[in-house]
Image (cartoon, rainbow, N blue to C red):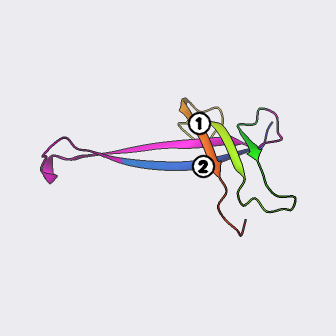
């Protein structure tokens, strides 16, 4: 089985409409798990598409991803959606 990293993302969204008093505001908590399968493994969901380095630094690297958002940390938990996009490595230390 492919090595998978699972990130827990908690997103709180405050829904407001027009001029609403503080007492009328609702708070909704969305909880889901971001499942990422590393590049170089079967069924990878993240791939490095640009790198300027010949050393171990990842600074400036660009990755694209298409990761599953699931209801729990288990890779077979209910699929809620997908997180798709790109990521830029900006740390000089990693």
Considering only vertical position in the picture, is 82 above or below 51? Answer: above
Give the alpha-carbon distance from disc 2 to disc 1, as whole Å: 15 Å
Please provide percent x and percent y for residue 52: 79, 55
Tell me, yes or no, if residue 6 can be seen here: yes
Task: Name which of mark 2 and mark 1 comes first in the sequence.
Answer: 2
Residue 56 falls in which quadrant of the image?
A: bottom right
Crowd tier of the residue under label 2, counting other residues whose Cα lies within 10 Å: few below 14, some 14–19, many 20 or above? few
Question: How dense is the environment of label 1, judged by Cα within 10 Å: few (below 14), some, or many (20 and up)?
Answer: few
> SS at mark 2?
strand
Q: Per the image, is 26 magenta?
A: yes
Label 2 belongs to which residue? 7
Is the C terminus in the top left, top right, bottom left or bottom right quadrant?
bottom right
Residue topped by disc 1: 84
51 horizontally vs 80: left or right? right
Q: Residue at x 14, y 51 (%)?
A: 23
Instruction: Tell whether 76 sits left or right of 9.
Output: right
Magenta residues? 13-42
Q: Residue at x 59, y 39 (%)?
A: 85
Provide residue 71's location: percent of width, then percent of height: 53, 36
Q: Residue 85: say if magenta.
A: no
């Amino acid at each position: 089985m492919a090595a998978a990293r699972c990130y827990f993302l908690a997103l709180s969204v405050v829904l407001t409409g027009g001029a609403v008093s503080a007492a009328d505001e609702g708070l909704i908590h969305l909880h889901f798990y971001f499942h990422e399968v590393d590049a170089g493994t079967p069924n990878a969901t993240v791939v490095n598409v640009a790198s300027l380095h010949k050393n171990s630094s990842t600074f400036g690297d660009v990755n694209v991803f298409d990761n599953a958002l699931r209801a729990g940390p288990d890779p077979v938990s209910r699929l809620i959606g997908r997180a798709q996009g790109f990521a830029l490595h900006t740390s000089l230390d990693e």
